[in-house]
Image (tube, helix red, strand yellow):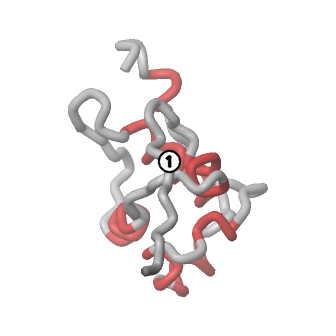
């Protein structure tokens, strides 16, 4: 019988890089990057209930566009199938996020 690797659940961890590097359980939401790039707007609003991954998604976006980010943390994820988008945008700063400044509700 083959025993499956048990992954840790990332309760309270909002760092995409930490989750990927330290082997936490992660549901691939990198398709959001593709959707944003193909259907962009000057302003994008992310509405979700509390504790629903807004900060983690913003950190994932930051890691993707970061000039000094590690591309290998995206290995095996859906966004890497989008080679043209990755060549054009990955590791290239395309704008700014204002989540940290606007997160005044403590969530």
Q: Is residue 73 left or right of residue 56?
A: right
Horizontal and vertical percent position of residue 73: 64, 64
Picture residue at 34% right of the left edge, 55% below the top: 41
Q: Could you tell me residue 103's position as x and y percent?
A: 42, 21
Query: Toward the viewer: 36 or 57?
Result: 57
Nearest the eye: 22 or 44: 22
The residue wearing badge 1 is 8
Q: Nearer the viewer, residue 53 or 99?
A: 53
Which quadrant, please, contains the C terminus? top left
Q: Residue at x 51, y 22 (%)?
A: 101
The N terminus: image quadrant:
bottom left
Residue at x 35%, y 13% (from the top left corner): 105
Q: Is residue 70 left or right of residue 3?
A: right
Side (left or right) of 36 relative to 76: left
Front residue of this view, candidates 2 and 47: 2
Instruction: Tell me the quarter of the picture where residue 67 sits.
Output: bottom right
For disc 1, the neighbor class at 10 Å (few under 14, some 14 to 19, many from 20) is: few
Q: How many marks?
A: 1
């Amino acid at each position: 019988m083959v025993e499956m690797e048990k992954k840790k659940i990332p309760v309270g961890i909002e760092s995409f890089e930490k989750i990927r590097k330290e082997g936490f359980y992660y549901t691939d939401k990198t398709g959001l990057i593709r959707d944003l790039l193909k259907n962009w707007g000057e302003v994008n609003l992310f509405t979700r209930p509390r504790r629903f991954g807004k900060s983690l998604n913003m950190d994932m976006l930051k890691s993707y566009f970061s000039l000094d980010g590690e591309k290998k943390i995206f290995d095996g994820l859906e966004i890497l199938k989008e080679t043209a988008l990755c060549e054009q945008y990955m590791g290239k700063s395309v704008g700014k996020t204002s989540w940290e400044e606007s997160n005044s509700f403590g969530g």
